[in-house]
Amino acid sequence: MNIAIYPGTFDPITYGHIDVIKKSLNVFDKLIVATTDNINKNYYFSIDDRISIINNSLFKDLKLNKNKIKVISFDNLTIDLCKKFKANTIIRGLRAVSDFEYEFQLAGMNKKLNSKIETMFLMSDVENQIISSKFVKEIASLGGNIDRFVTRSTVKKLQNKF
């Protein structure tokens, strides 16, 4: 079975992330969507809330195949996660050229830590490339319409926060 890991904060998951997930499912038999609770970041949603939001977005709102996607949390190195799930590929999403330098360095470090793990960069569709979780939260906090950026259940979760 060909398995990949898609790590990220997903705070919250957006249609940009979902595009990357859908594209990954065209290439891999199984995708592990792994949200982290990195102590170096300030999260808007707790790890449990983010897992719930991801599950609701993917399986309730979009009806994606639960047999092909597993949603988990993690607090260790992504390459250790790959070993645990026998995944040989890390998926990373790119929105703009500005993302590339950081992602390129991250992929290089992961390759140094485990030369058997490859990183695959995927871009979301053009209409979703500008979406970021940060902007979605900001728009929601100011009462703006975020329907085009996140799924229905995520909209409700954000509206309840504000």
Image: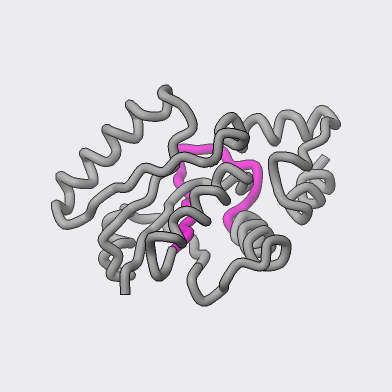
Q: Is residue 12 magenta?
A: no
Say which residue appears at 77% left-offset and 45% top-offset. 158
Viewer-proximal residue among 77 and 57: 57
Q: Residue furthest top?
A: 98
Q: Is residue 120 above or below residue 89?
A: above
Residue 87 sits in which quadrant?
A: bottom left
Image location (x, y in percent) of residue 35: 50, 54
Q: Quadrant of residue 88?
A: bottom left
What stretch of residues is rendered in magenta? 32-47
The quadrant of the rendering that contains the N terminus is: bottom left
Question: Which color mode does the image show?
Answer: one colour
Instruction: Locate residue 50, reporting x and y percent.
Output: 61, 55
Q: Quadrant of the C terminus?
A: top right
Magenta part, dominant SS:
loop
Q: Residue at x 67, y 58 (%)?
A: 57
Residue 33 is covered by the magenta coloring: yes
Q: Measured from the top left, where is residue 124 in percent x and y?
A: 52, 41
Q: Position of residue 65 (x, y in %)?
A: 57, 71
Compared with 144, 85 (above or below) is below
Left or right: 104 as drawn, with respect to 138: left
From what the image shows, is residue 149 above or below residue 154? above
Q: Is residue 125 left or right of residue 75?
A: right
Q: Residue at x 42, y 29 (%)?
A: 99
